[in-house]
């Protein structure tokens, strides 16, 4: 029996929030969206700390790589800003893409940063030198999301052309295109063990793919509208999905059964508009929405 209680609401954004990311430093959250700046919050006091830096375009992606004193912010302009926590300023601007950047992930094993863009390419950068290493053409259209498996030998990209494309992370050669969604793929996550891949799309479906055979294990008609984000609990066998239908759902990661719905219809003081991003901070679930709010939920399993 999963019990969910709303513990806090972080307000202050004046426009929709598209991205949220936990800092490398415990108890700190970063958010960005259709605003003039990237915001830092304290999860210990549930309060606004400061605007980290101003931006000239909407922030679609934030990434804080473990082991590096850096934060990356991907903008609608295609630029990626690099903020150095030691120097407390933006030290680099990665100007490679000229169309919006939708997702940023990194491989600790390879010390590489991957940036996905609307231009259909993924750029690969050195985390050590911030030099551009490769550019991979994945699609003729937008790439919306990236996920790297726990072994760090595979990377999957979710595309606007409905495909999930799996690549070898070692040499960036394509391995398999997973066909099944009927609309753009918005979110992808490998399971914490890496045995399967979960995809969520604009078609409101969640699909579970076997990571060895690349066959479809299960299709779940998960939401009424687009599945915007998927987030696995860091230690427990559950994952959460966020949707344009204003609901968050928590699923069993073994049987893929629905275990909880967090929405206004279910009596929760939840978001009034599309929920765009999720993050687990231990047993606390954080959600960001078009309604300009971040809500923190205490989840008891």
Image (cartoon, rainbow, N blue to C red):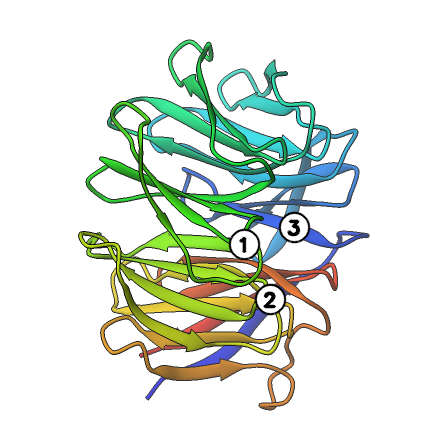
* Residue 231 image-quadrant placement: bottom left
Give the residue at mark 2: 226
- Screen quadrant of the C terminus: bottom left
Rendered location of residue 29, percent (x, y): 53, 47
* Residue 274 image-quadrant placement: bottom right
Residue at x 49%, y 70% (from the top left corner): 205
Which of discs 3 and 1 lies nearer the camera? The answer is 1
Q: Is residue 21 above or below residue 51?
A: below
Q: Residues within 10 Å of mark 1 (few under 14, many from 20)?
A: many
Which secondary structure, mark 1? strand
Rendered location of residue 204, percent (x, y): 55, 70
Which of discs 3 and 2 lies nearer the camera? The answer is 2
Give the residue at mark 1: 186
Report the number of discs: 3
Rendered location of residue 278, percent (x, y): 51, 59
Q: CA distance from mark 3 to mark 1?
A: 12 Å
Residue at x 58%, y 35% (from the top left corner): 140
Rendered location of residue 49, percent (x, y): 64, 43
| Marks 3,2: beta carbons within 8 A | no
Residue at x 28%, y 57% (from the top left corner): 191
Disc on res. 18: 3
Front position in the image: 170 or 163: 163
| Marks 1,2: beta carbons within 8 A | yes
- Screen quadrant of the N terminus: bottom left
């Amino acid at each position: 029996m999963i019990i969910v209680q709303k513990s806090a609401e972080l307000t202050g954004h004046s426009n929709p929030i598209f991205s949220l990311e936990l800092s490398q430093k415990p108890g700190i959250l970063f958010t960005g969206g259709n605003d003039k700046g990237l915001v830092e919050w304290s999860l210990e006091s549930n309060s606004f700390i400061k605007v980290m830096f101003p931006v000239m375009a909407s922030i679609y992606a934030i990434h804080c790589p473990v082991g590096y004193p850096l934060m990356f912010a991907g903008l609608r302009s295609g630029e990626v800003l690099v903020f150095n926590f030691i120097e407390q300023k933006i030290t680099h601007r990665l100007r490679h893409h000229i169309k919006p950047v939708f997702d940023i992930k990194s491989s600790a094993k390879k010390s590489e940063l991957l940036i996905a863009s609307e231009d259909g390419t993924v750029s690969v950068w050195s985390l050590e030198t911030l030099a551009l290493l490769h550019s991979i053409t994945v699609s003729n259209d937008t790439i919306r999301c990236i996920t790297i498996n726990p072994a760090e030998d595979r990377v999957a990209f979710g595309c606007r052309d409905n495909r999930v494309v799996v690549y070898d992370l070692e040499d960036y050669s394509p391995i398999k295109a997973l066909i099944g969604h009927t609309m753009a793929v918005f979110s992808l996550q490998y399971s914490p063990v890496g045995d399967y891949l979960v995809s969520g799309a604009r078609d409101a479906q969640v699909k579970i793919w076997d990571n060895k055979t690349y066959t479809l294990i299960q299709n779940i008609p998960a939401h009424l509208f687009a599945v915007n984000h998927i987030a696995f609990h860091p230690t427990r066998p559950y994952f959460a999905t966020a949707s344009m239908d204003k609901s968050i759902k928590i699923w069993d990661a073994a049987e893929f059964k629905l275990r909880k719905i967090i929405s206004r219809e279910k009596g929760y003081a939840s978001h009034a508009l599309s929920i765009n991003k999720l993050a687990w901070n231990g047993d606390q679930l954080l959600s960001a929405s078009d309604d300009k709010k971040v809500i923190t939920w205490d989840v008891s399993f």
